[in-house]
Amino acid sequence: MRVAVFGGSFNPPHLGHALAGTWILATGEVDHVLVVPANRHAFGKPLAPFELRMALTQAAFACVASCTVDPIEFELSGESRTIFTLEALARLHPSWELRLVVGTDVVAESEKWFRFDDIRRLAPLLVLPRSDGGQASMLPVVSSTHVRHLLRHGGAAAVRDLVPRAVHDLLDAASIAALLGDP
């Protein structure tokens, strides 16, 4: 089975993420998309608790056929490193042919990645074309940073058109506070 590994912070997941999953499947290059929320950001970026991001990501991808969300990075614990995740997946599923989903911005910054050449050998890249705004060019221009900004200034109502409905339904005061890093 050909499996695309689509990792990210998903802090929070938005429509661009869900639509990217659909686009990946529609290209015909893979049979399944495995969505992998990061446990801890490799570059120290603060994230909402893993359990919240996992629940929101499961909600975001629930309507995308042939996509599953996997907690493997939480199970591996520690700082998220793509090569460790891919090596663990290869051990757990030796029959899988892995591909790694990245944006064109990642390819340009590959020197910052830990063991990037090993990553490319283990899981050849499946590159999402991106616009100057950082979002895949065929998808709505939205980012988790922008969603958090709107949540801070307008609450859940401000992001209604930027996140999947199932994610929006989970955005209560406690989850919004956690996403924003508020006590």
Image: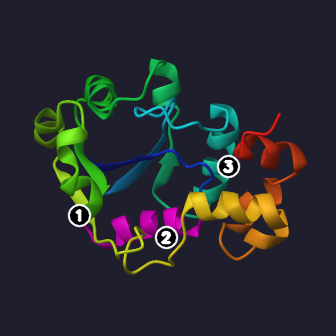
Using the rendered view, name the quadrant where residue 60 is placed. bottom right
Which numbered circle lies on residue 29? 1
Whole-percent x, y for residue 168 in the image: 77, 62
Provide the residue designation for mark 3: 56
Q: Earlier in the sequence, mark 1 or mark 3?
A: 1
Residue at position x 42%, y 70% in the image: 135
Q: Which residues are magenta?
A: 14-30
Crowd rating for badge 2 (residues with CA inside 10 Å; few <14, some 14–19, many 20+): some
What amino acid is labelled 2 in the image? Leu
Q: Are marks 1 and 2 in contact (CB under 8 Å)?
A: no
Provide the residue designation for mark 2: 19
Q: Nearer the viewer, mark 1 or mark 2?
A: 2
Residue at position x 62%, y 48% in the image: 58
Q: Nearer the viewer, mark 1 or mark 3?
A: 3
What amino acid is labelled 1 in the image? Glu
Q: Earlier in the sequence, mark 1 or mark 2?
A: 2
Q: Judging from the image, what secondary structure is the residue with disc 1 in? A: loop
Q: Judging from the image, what secondary structure is the residue with disc 3 in? A: helix
